[in-house]
């Protein structure tokens, strides 16, 4: 019969580190919960900035994973989650054609979310199940709430994050996404290099 965990004491440095990491986790949870609240339609505009307990629970699931048995999947498993602005659809259509030629599975919300499905939950489920989170950063999308929200969920879920820069300078990529190695894709050669990188990541 195994014994229970023994008593232990944190030394001074460990206690300080624990406090710092707990504060960091709290900031991430607050940020994700606030974004979840902001994307939820409210009947009263005065409630738009109110974060409910359910938003905090959803944020915790994104950060720490679900507790208990996961719900049945309503989206197909994918290698690459594509986060983008619908205003950049022409480039994304070219990208997905290349992904299909390379037989790399991907999630694209307007294609993969079924009618009558909870849109937000399907997004979070796809992010949790993907191998690579690919964010198409353009001047339009980098200012979008969805960029921050989806990207924050991928970062908190410790996914491989690959920012694709299209007419965006690396110095303009906001924290914490500036820490990830990005790739510039503004021509056909660079797009081919991106597909090669995704093929490599999909096999890792």
Image (cartoon, rainbow, N blue to C red):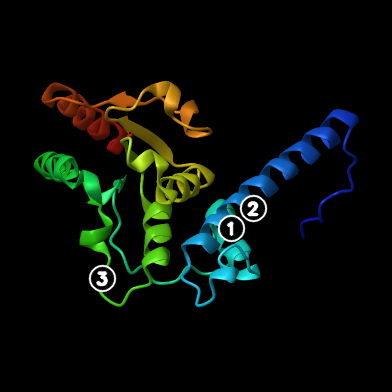
> Is residue 13 left or right of 20 when viewed as pictured?
right
Disc assigned to residue 33:
1
Judged from the image, the secondary structure of the residue bearing numbered disc 2 is helix
Q: In the rendering, at what x and y percent does residue 49 appear? A: 59, 62
Instruction: State yes or no: discs 3 and 1 in contact (Cβ < 8 Å).
Output: no
Disc assigned to residue 84:
none
Q: CA distance from mark 2 to mark 1?
A: 5 Å
Q: In the rendering, at what x and y percent does residue 105 appear? A: 22, 48
Q: What residue sits right under mark 2 in the picture?
A: 30
Disc assigned to residue 114:
3
> Is residue 14 left or right of 77 when viewed as pictured?
right
User: Is residue 54 among the parts visible in the rendering?
Assistant: yes
Q: Residue at x 58, y 65 (%)?
A: 55
Camera-near label (2 vs 3) is 2
- Judging depth in this view, the residue of 192 and 78 nearest the camera is 192
User: Is residue 133 among the parts visible in the rendering?
Assistant: no
Q: Residue at x 27, y 30 (%)?
A: 166
Judged from the image, the secondary structure of the residue bearing numbered disc 3 is loop
Q: How many marks?
A: 3
Image quadrant of residue 14? Answer: top right
Instruction: State yes or no: discs 2 and 1 in contact (Cβ < 8 Å).
Output: yes
Camera-near label (3 vs 1) is 1
Q: Residue at x 49, y 27 (%)?
A: 179
Q: In the rendering, at what x and y percent does residue 65 appear? A: 55, 57
Q: CA distance from mark 3 to mark 1?
A: 25 Å
Judged from the image, the secondary structure of the residue bearing numbered disc 1 is helix
């Amino acid at each position: 019969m195994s014994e229970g965990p023994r008593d232990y004491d944190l030394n001074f440095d460990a206690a300080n580190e624990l406090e710092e990491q707990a504060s960091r986790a709290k900031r991430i949870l607050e940020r994700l919960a606030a974004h979840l609240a902001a994307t939820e339609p409210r009947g009263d505009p005065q409630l738009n900035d109110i974060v409910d307990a359910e938003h905090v629970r959803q944020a915790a699931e994104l950060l720490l994973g679900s507790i208990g048995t996961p719900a049945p999947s309503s989206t197909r498993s994918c290698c690459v989650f594509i986060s983008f602005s619908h205003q950049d659809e022409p480039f994304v259509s070219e990208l997905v054609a290349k992904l299909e030629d390379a037989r790399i599975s991907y999630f694209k919300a307007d294609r993969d979310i079924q009618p009558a499905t909870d849109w937000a939950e399907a997004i979070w489920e796809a992010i949790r199940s993907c191998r690579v989170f690919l964010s198409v950063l353009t001047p339009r999308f980098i200012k979008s709430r969805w960029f921050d929200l989806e990207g924050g969920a991928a970062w908190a879920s410790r996914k491989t994050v690959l920012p694709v820069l299209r007419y965006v300078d690396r110095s303009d990529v906001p924290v914490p996404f500036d820490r990830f190695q990005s790739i510039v894709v503004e021509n056909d050669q660079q797009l081919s290099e991106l597909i090669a990188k995704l093929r490599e990541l999909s096999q890792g």
